[in-house]
Amino acid sequence: AVGFYNEDPASGKIKRTDRIELDVDGELTEVPDVAGKPRPAVLLVNDDDLTYTKIRLDNESLEFAASNLYRFDDALTRAVIWLAFWDMTRDGEFPAERFIELSLKALATEIESTTFRYALAQVGTTAWHYTAHDRREDVVRHVAHTLWQLANQAQAGSDNQFQLVTAYLSYGEVGDAEFAANAHGLLNGTVLLPGLSIDNNFRWTVIRALASVNEMSCDEIEAELAKRDTTENREFTMGARASRVTEDAKRWAWNEALHNSDLTNAQIEAVAYGFSGTARGELADPYVAKYFAGVDWVWKNKTYHMAETLLNGLYPANADPAELVKAGDEWLAAHTDADRALRRLVIENLAGSRRTLQVQSYNESL
């Protein structure tokens, strides 16, 4: 379907004013039913999301939609347009910072929970991985500040409020005094958001956030576990300790994940993903060579499930993507006869690094 969208003067919302269904057959499909009609503010192909496809907006529609996404009346329409901008961003066709700005503006009014959650994840990936390297710190702090503002403006006790605070807690950087103060306040009760429930899981989300900016030591994390020593909290403890931004923490996490046979599968998963979750590239860079040197050992000595967990969880995705691609291609070239399942794991991880390298290069060229 092709949708026509224009501003409704009475409400100020962007609403559909016409819609035409058709079958696409071949490279070019003419739509004679639109001939002679006034051009709308936005022409949306795949209106109502009737088929599986990537879409691109014409220049006029793109500019209008980028400035007015939050004004579209229909939730599905917003989602289809948002996804188009996301596809363009992750394909290196739309500026990362512009995508972040239009998304933050739309998040202020979005009410559809699935779209809201997905958009938060898209913003996180874009800010941490796709922005130009010399702009990243400023962009991350801007996103964090905006998310905190939105969380404080959100409806008390709402799902949006919870999602915003949770997302905010993933934007910590060492030395960010505002972030540290807010996270400490949430943990000790001096910072309150009306209606926000601090249950056990959320409390550990805050603890991990503090650990990830070195605002909580290993002893302090263990002390939190001692307050309520459960199987689940032991997993949270492993993840929090692995998230600390120090060489010692990463070395400890790497060795625990690979060589501590006393850990449960869930604890290994927690420590592995805690290891790779730190966005600081200088801590991840030394593990590029170690990772590819250890792939064969992991595959030989672990069950398939645990090998998959380790090879995904320990993949140093925050390292220099060019080095990851280079090392990964060398491994693949030397392992043409490796099990297909193993090659698939390596290829899928490398695909993310290839995309990161491509999109970063695009944004650095702007």
Image (tube, rainbow, N blue to C red):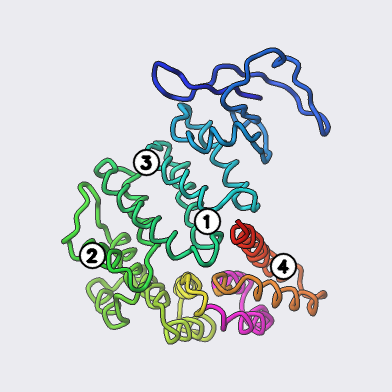
Query: Looking at the rendering, which quadrant does residue 312 occupy?
Result: bottom right
Alpha carbon distance from label 1 to label 4:
29 Å
* Residue carrying label 4: 341
Number of the front mark, 1 or 4: 1
The residue at the point 53 percent across, 78 percent down is 284
Q: Could you tell which of marks 1 and 4 lies nearer the N-terminus? A: 1
The vertical placement of 110 against 258, above or below, is above
* Residue carrying label 3: 108
Please give the label number shown on residue 187: 2
* Residue type at numbered disc 3: Ala
Alpha carbon distance from label 1 to label 3:
18 Å
Number of the front mark, 2 or 4: 2
Please give the label number shown on residue 113: none
**Magenta span covers which residues?**
284-313
> Callout 2: helix, strand or loop?
helix
* Residue type at numbered disc 4: Ala
Q: Residue 309: within the magenta? A: yes
Q: Determine the main secondary structure of the stretch shown in magenta.
A: helix
Q: Are marks 2 and 4 in contact (CB under 8 Å)?
A: no
**Residue extending farthest front:** 366
Compare residues 325 and 100 and report the one nearer the observer.
100
The residue at the point 49 percent across, 58 percent down is 127
* Residue type at numbered disc 2: Leu
Query: Looking at the rendering, which quadrant does residue 17 occupy?
Result: top right
Image coordinates for residue 338, horizontal then vertical, percent = 78, 75
Image coordinates for residue 76, horizontal then vertical, percent = 52, 32
Alpha carbon distance from label 3 to label 2:
25 Å
* Residue carrying label 1: 126
Number of the front mark, 2 or 1: 1
